[in-house]
């Protein structure tokens, strides 16, 4: 069951299961519906709970529905060609010089969709330039951001866009193994991706000397049993090696020494799924969509506070207001802020909506973060101090424990806020500022380093609401 | 001159592939930049972050705090070893460390020979401002072994012992378990030293910056040193 939700759901489940059989799980990627739960390897949500009897008899499959929509020039959500036609893109790639493919990718300006917005062409090129007979393409499908389910959409609805994307990345870099690291909470994705790989085998698109070329490639699907931090690329690699998911120092970068010390490219699902479009239409066609510095489209996950929750695709640069009103159908009830881009993204007050467009630069300029573009609403009547307590608690719980600022600071911040929330203790603003600065400038990775952003946004835009918790 | 970079606006020559820490130590002295998780002969780990320095690409340009022990020097960069911001960062990190450390230096075995104590004094900690919270102060000592002892209430999770056991001794007896605030050092399968596969080489005790792991024959006590 999804953590911290729904007593009603628990009561209904308890009718079928004993207390020790009902537990709590992390985000199941069902943010668009409430009442998410998980029975014997399958996820359910929404009204599924009312069919709990047939679920237990394995007669029922989820009636999950979410809206999918788009505007502008959709790349991922529009209908894709049937299998044979679609893979003509790959057949053509195999007849093209990898350097030419790389040049198209450079022209496309495609930036990583997993959070940091790093150039994909740059990563592939640096991996390509390292000599090694073993290289890996790792797809980060750990989608841990609460509120994000767009990677799940791609894996379940557009599995071949992702798989072909990884094959193209392999062709460009000279990697022969593609690893899809899928979070354990997404069993349907694991199944659909595995079936799609089997289909590729059946069509001889995988293996040695694919279609008579000198390109070798095959896939491995890993069902991750990890924590949120396993989505951080170096912790992900440690986890793949069977070690404790601890963040590593960089350099060496994964493209130099990644999985098992071999050159490795780690990319997000959505990033890789854009490759087939670029190979078919050319880099310039891609960069003509969006803004000069944030090219292409972006998937957006809207949560259940919108009238039309769902997965939407819009051109980079689309005004945020248009996304909220036209795609999301507006808010269902009064909302005071939106947490955009995951737990480490910014807290956007509704007063800033008209200043933002959907792209990396607009968000950065206004002091927020586009991240993975998941949108989680904070209702008008939800106390922000509770939200801050939750953010610190989340970070403290998910911290890998390696670096001092995050291991100690996230827990101390949580304790301080909790104390102020539940007693007459007042926080010292200077101490809070020192803590945020320490996390932001000192942390080894973006978990500890990213927490201060939403907290600072809250302190800035909801100063009056939070003032009573601080010393005067 | 070959490749160069600036330390506090003075120009120095870089050795190929060296870290900012070794560059600074070579040219302007060993005690300029404090460290806790770094140790000679061990791979850089990047945990404590007190070795951070400011690095700018142009003079007086925007600077980024970078951990000097694992960041290579970039030719032409401007390194500032103790800007106000960096001094604040180091002090605030040590303050956090002291929220989970017994404040009993005077009776501690390694009093006056403790890296944490030295760094704390150098960064100028006056008090710990955080309210009391969870901690590891009641961790039991492990006195099961004739030579090796541990008192993990003194442990600062720097991971030096783990790397020493692995990289120096090739034993991998010690490892870090758990996560976040609850991470802790385990010996083999969470045993005591006597039940673990420890070969009593003492490498971990030598690497430990505090008195969290000790070797009875190689006490780091200052009194013992003088004998
Ligand atoms: C705490 C943390 C969690 C992360 N989780 C994810 C994730 O679930 N999925 C993802 O693609 N990237 C995640 N990232 C970002 C990855 O480290 C990495 O930047 C990304 O996979 C690179 O792919 P891209 O360039 O295609 O975005 C996370 C980063 C951090 C610090
Ligand atoms: S910031 Fe947190 S999660 Fe990242 S390395 Fe440091 S302790 Fe680990
Ligand atoms: S004394 Fe034991 S635990 Fe310590 S480094 Fe040697 S073998 Fe490892
Ligand atoms: S026992 Fe010593 S060396 Fe090991 S992590 Fe703790 S403080 Fe560091
Ligand atoms: S000495 Fe550099 S991070 Fe600890």
Image: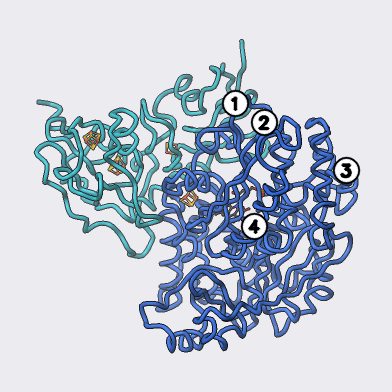
Chain colours: A blue, B cyan
Q: Which residue is mark 4?
A: A195
Label 2 CB less than 8 angstroms from ligand 5: no
SS for tag 3? loop
Q: Which residue is mark 1?
A: B9
SS for tag 4? helix
Labelled pair 1, 2 in contact (Cβ < 8 Å): yes
* Residue at x 86% of width, y 66% of height: A71
Are the residues under marks 2 and 3 on the same chain? no
Subunit that carries the residue with mark 4: A
In the picture, measured across the screen, residue A280 lies left or right of residue A464, that is right
SS for tag 1? loop
In the picture, measured across the screen, residue A454 lies left or right of residue B30, that is right
Tell me the CA gap for discs 1 and 3.
Answer: 47 Å
Tell me the CA gap for discs 4 and 1.
Answer: 60 Å
> In this picture, is A321 found above or below A17?
above
For mark 2, does the 10 Å Cα neighbourhood hold few (<14), some (14 to 19), or many (20 or more) residues? some
């Amino acid at each position: 069951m999804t953590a911290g939700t729904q007593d009603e759901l628990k009561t209904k489940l308890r009718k079928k299961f004993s207390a020790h059989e009902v537990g709590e799980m992390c985000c199941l990627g069902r943010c668009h519906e409430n009442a998410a739960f998980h029975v014997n390897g399958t996820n359910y949500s929404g009204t599924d709970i009312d069919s709990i009897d047939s679920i237990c008899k394995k007669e029922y499959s989820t009636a999950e529905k979410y809206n999918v929509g788009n505007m502008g020039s959709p790349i991922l959500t529009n209908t894709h060609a049937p299998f044979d036609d679609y893979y003509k893109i790959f057949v053509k790639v195999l007849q093209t010089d990898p350097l030419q493919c790389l040049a198209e990718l450079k022209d496309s300006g495609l930036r990583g969709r997993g959070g940091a917005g790093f150039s994909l062409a740059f990563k592939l090129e640096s991996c390509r330039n390292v000599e090694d007979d073993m290289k890996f393409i790792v797809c980060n499908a750990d989608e841990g951001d609460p509120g994000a389910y767009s990677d799940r959409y791609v894996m379940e609805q557009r599995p071949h866009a992702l798989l072909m994307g990884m094959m193209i990345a392999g062709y460009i870099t000279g990697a022969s193994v593609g690893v899809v690291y899928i979070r354990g909470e997404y069993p349907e994705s694991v199944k659909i991706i595995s079936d799609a790989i089997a289909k590729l085998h059946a069509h001889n698109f995988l293996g040695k000397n694919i279609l008579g070329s000198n390109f070798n490639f095959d896939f491995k699907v890993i069902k991750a049993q990890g924590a949120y931090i396993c989505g951080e690329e170096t912790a992900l690699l440690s986890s793949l090696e069977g070690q404790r998911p601890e963040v590593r120092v960089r350099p060496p970068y994964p493209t130099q020494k990644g999985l098992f010390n071999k050159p490795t490219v780690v990319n997000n699902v959505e990033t890789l799924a854009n490759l087939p479009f670029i190979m078919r239409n050319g880099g310039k066609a891609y960069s003509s969509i969006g803004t000069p510095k944030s090219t292409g489209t972006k998937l957006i996950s809207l949560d259940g506070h919108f009238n039309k929750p769902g997965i939407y695709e819009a051109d980079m640069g689309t005004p945020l207001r248009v996304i909220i009103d036209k795609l999301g159908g507006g808010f269902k009830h009064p909302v005071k802020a939106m947490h955009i881009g995951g737990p480490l993204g910014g807290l956007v007050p509704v007063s800033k909506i008209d200043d933002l467009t959907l792209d990396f630069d607009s968000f950065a300029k206004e002091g927020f973060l586009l991240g993975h573009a998941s949108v989680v609403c904070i209702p008008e009547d939800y106390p922000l101090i509770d939200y801050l307590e939750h953010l610190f608690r989340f970070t403290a719980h998910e911290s890998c424990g390696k670096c001092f600022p995050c291991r100690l600071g996230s827990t101390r911040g949580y304790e301080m806020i909790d104390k102020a929330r539940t007693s007459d203790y007042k926080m010292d603003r200077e101490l809070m500022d020192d803590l945020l600065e320490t996390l932001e400038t000192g942390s080894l990775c973006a978990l500890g380093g990213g927490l201060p952003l939403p907290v600072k946004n809250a302190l800035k835009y909801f100063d009056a609401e939070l003032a009573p918790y601080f010393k005067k | 001159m070959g490749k160069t970079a600036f330390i506090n606006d003075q120009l120095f020559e870089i050795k190929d592939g060296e870290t900012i820490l070794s560059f600074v130590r070579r040219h302007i002295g060993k005690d300029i930049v404090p460290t806790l998780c770094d140790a000679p002969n061990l791979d850089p780990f990047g945990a404590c972050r007190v070795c951070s320095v400011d690095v700018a690409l142009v003079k007086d340009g925007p600077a980024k705090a970078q951990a000097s022990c694992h960041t290579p020097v970039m030719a032409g960069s401007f390194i500032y070893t103790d800007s106000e911001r960096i001094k604040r960062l180091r002090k605030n990190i040590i303050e956090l460390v002291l929220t989970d450390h017994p404040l009993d230096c005077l009776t501690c075995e390694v009093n006056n020979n403790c890296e944490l104590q030295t760094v704390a004094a150098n960064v100028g900690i006056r008090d710990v401002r955080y309210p009391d919270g969870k901690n590891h102060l009641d961790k039991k000592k492990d006195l099961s072994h004739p030579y090796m002892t541990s008192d993990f209430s003194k442990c600062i999770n720097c991971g030096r012992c783990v790397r020493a056991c692995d990289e120096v001794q090739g034993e991998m007896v010690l490892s870090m378990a758990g996560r976040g605030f609850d991470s802790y050092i385990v010996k083999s399968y969470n045993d005591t030293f006597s039940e673990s596969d420890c070969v009593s080489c003492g490498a971990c005790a030598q690497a430990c910056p505090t008195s969290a792991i000790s070797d009875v024959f190689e006490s780091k006590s200052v009194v013992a040193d003088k004998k």
